[in-house]
Image (tube, helix red, strand yellow):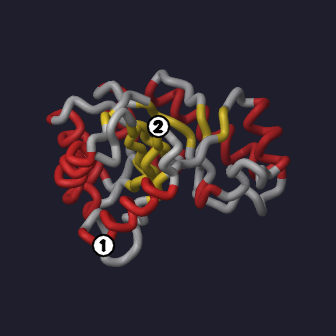
Amino acid sequence: MVGDGKSVILSFDDGPAPVDALESILQTLRANEIKAEFYVLGSEVKQYPEAARMIVREGHDIQNHSWSHPDLARATERDVRSELGDTQNIVADVTGVTPTKIRPPYGAGGFRGNLDPELVEVAGDLSLTIVTWDIDTEDWKAPKGLGTEKIRNIEVQFTQQWRKVSYNILMHVQPATARDLPAFISQLEEWGYTIAEP
């Protein structure tokens, strides 16, 4: 089996809204005893503080995905600083947890060999590790979610990176992903992957 002896981490960007999608995702994770990572937007944490607290209460990692989802590689250092710093502050204020990782929107400026110097500097000042992902589910592309064609594409990404033993899978907090998540978890297990804690 393709996933024998290998593990995956489930991660979700752009939360904590929409809240109903988040609640459904959290329910699925709870039912399967899975801990995941949530890369949240500061602006949404401000709007939905209770949703951010829910992520932490359920034992998941809450991390920084910027304040307003800009392309940080094109932003000035000052903008990068406020995008990351304001998000650090609101997450800490609302949940009592300070993020330790930043996943830049679109992965811009975050991939090895293509790191944005301002992002590196600001992340360093805020004690944030810059992270991206290994498997892009493209769950935001039409048809949204994790249906058959997305599963095929995900399988191809796994086989292209067969040397790896641990993979970070990128998804988004959205209704279609929430709907398809139970079947996707079953599929990962069928392939032989262990779902690890972040």
Using a 10 Å C-alpha cutoff, classify the residue at mark 2 as few (fewer than 14 neighbours), some (14 to 19) or many (20 or more). some
Front residue (pair 18, 157)? 157
Q: Quadrant of the C terminus?
A: top left
Using a 10 Å C-alpha cutoff, classify the residue at mark 1 as few (fewer than 14 neighbours), some (14 to 19) or many (20 or more). few
Q: What element carries label 2?
A: strand
Which amino acid, mark 2? Ser
Query: Farthest residue toward the bottom?
Result: 142
Which amino acid, mark 1? Glu
Q: Position of residue 180 (x, y in %)?
A: 21, 58
Displayed quadrant of residue 32 = top left
Displayed quadrant of residue 21 = bottom left
Taking the spot 40% from the left edge, 38% from the top edge, the residue there is: 9
Q: Where is residue 167 in the image (x, y as percent from the top left)?
A: 46, 42
- Estimate the spatial distance between the alpha carbons at disc 1 and disc 2, rounded to whole Å: 23 Å
Front residue (pair 128, 54)? 128
Look at the image and tell me whether residue 47 can be seen: no
Q: Where is residue 145 in the image (x, y as percent from the top left)?
A: 29, 65
In the drawing, does residue 23 fall left or right of residue 86?
Answer: left
Could you say which disc has been placed on residue 100 in the image? Answer: none
In the drawing, does residue 23 fall left or right of residue 172?
Answer: left
Q: What element carries label 1?
A: helix
Q: Say above or below: 117 vs 194.
A: below
Compare marks 1 and 2 and give the one earlier in the sequence: 1
Could you say which disc has been placed on residue 149 in the image? Answer: 1
In the drawing, does residue 80 fall left or right of residue 67?
Answer: right
Taking the spot 36% from the left edge, 59% from the top edge, the residue there is: 155
Front residue (pair 135, 56)? 135
Front residue (pair 155, 126)? 155
Taking the spot 64% from the left edge, 61% from the top edge, the residue there is: 70
For disc 2, the marked residue is 166
